[in-house]
Amino acid sequence: MQFTLLVTLLIGFISLFYSIAGQVGGAAFLAVMAFAGLPAEQMRPTALVLNVFAASYATWRLHRHGRIAWSLLWRIAIPSMLAAFIGGLFVPGGSLYYIMTGTLLIAASVLMLVKRDLDNAKRRQVRLARAAPVGAVTGLLSGLTGIGGGVFLAPLIVALGWASPRQAAGLSPPFILSNSVLALAGMLLSGQSVNPDVAFYASSAILGAMLGTFIGLRWMSDRATRYVLAAIMLFAGVRLLLR
């Protein structure tokens, strides 16, 4: 019980920290569960359940404050949802899973750091023909890794000049929510299961999201958002590779 409490507290802190930058915490949730020794087959679906709870709250708050570019989101999210469902049907092996996910997160972190000139990028219209492949790729990665996909989407659309870091942060929670729901459905249909303590973890995740979203809406600049995103992706990626 004490160990469950420790994991629950860590998940709440992670959710708070990620939500400040418009993310949910799926990558770090996985790192904590790997550290805790949870079975690999439970880690992905459990992380996605936490994503759904935290991202639902963040999406609601961001929508109320007008921070979600729905016109760009639907062009990316619709193709990503089908790809996330397909990715969720697959069950990568333990070592392959850690290496793949950790490497992708470190690459995304580097991408955020090298694109310093896009902090003040203006949101612009993006054609469906360009947005759909980006959504499909990030959705597939979401399903395969058990991460909602926001940490893959945000650095990619910033690097492409489609949005500033803060605008990308506004797109991430609804994108994570849609991908997590579909990826989780694919995993459950393929016979994967969540951890029995998921209710404790989910309660902590949504509390962290409430506080983190409040902080992010009021005090985060584009530069701060970009650096926080890069730091959390780098940490989670290294942690998974070491696992």
Image (tube, helix red, strand yellow):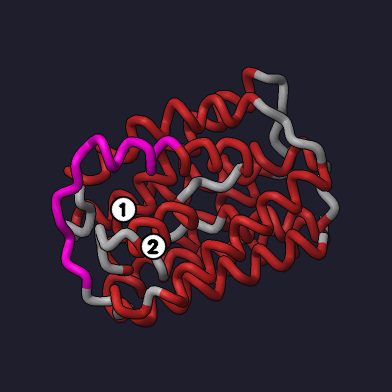
- Do the numbered discs 2 and 1 sit on residues whose CB atoms are within 8 Å? yes
Q: What residue do we see at 22% from left, 46% from top?
A: 72
Q: What numbered label is drawn on residue 220? A: none
Horizontal side of 78 relative to 100 (left or right) equals left
Residue to which mark 1 is pinned: 171
Horizontal side of 125 relative to 92 (left or right) equals left
Query: Which picture quadrant has residue 162?
Result: bottom left
Disc 2 from disc 1: Cα separation: 8 Å
Depth check: 16 or 68 in front? Answer: 68
Q: Which is nearer the N-term, disc 2 or disc 1?
A: 2
In the rendered image, residue 67, in percent from the top left (x then y), is placed at 21, 59
Q: What residue do we see at 71% from left, 27% from top?
A: 192
Question: What's the residue type where badge 2 is placed?
Answer: Gly
In the rendered image, residue 54, in percent from the top left (x then y), is placed at 46, 51
Depth check: 213 or 227 in front? Answer: 227
- Residue 29 lies, with reference to residue 81, above or below; the image says below
- Residue 121 lies, with reference to residue 74, above or below; the image says below
Magenta extent: 121-136
- Residue 63 lies, with reference to residue 83, above or below; the image says below
Residue to which mark 2 is pinned: 22
Q: What residue do we see at 68% from left, 20% from top?
A: 190
In the rendered image, residue 145, in percent from the top left (x then y), is placed at 63, 43
Which SS class for mark 2? Answer: loop
Question: What's the residue type where badge 1 is placed?
Answer: Leu
Depth check: 124 or 200 in front? Answer: 124
Q: What residue do we see at 49% from left, 66% from top?
A: 18
Quadrant that contains the N terminus: bottom right
- Please check the rendered image and state whether residue 135 is part of the magenta-colored stretch, yes or no: yes
- Residue 3 lies, with reference to residue 110, above or below; the image says above
In the rendered image, residue 102, in percent from the top left (x then y), is placed at 68, 58
Quadrant that contains the C terminus: bottom right
Pointer 2: residues within 10 angstroms few (<14), some, or many (20+)? many
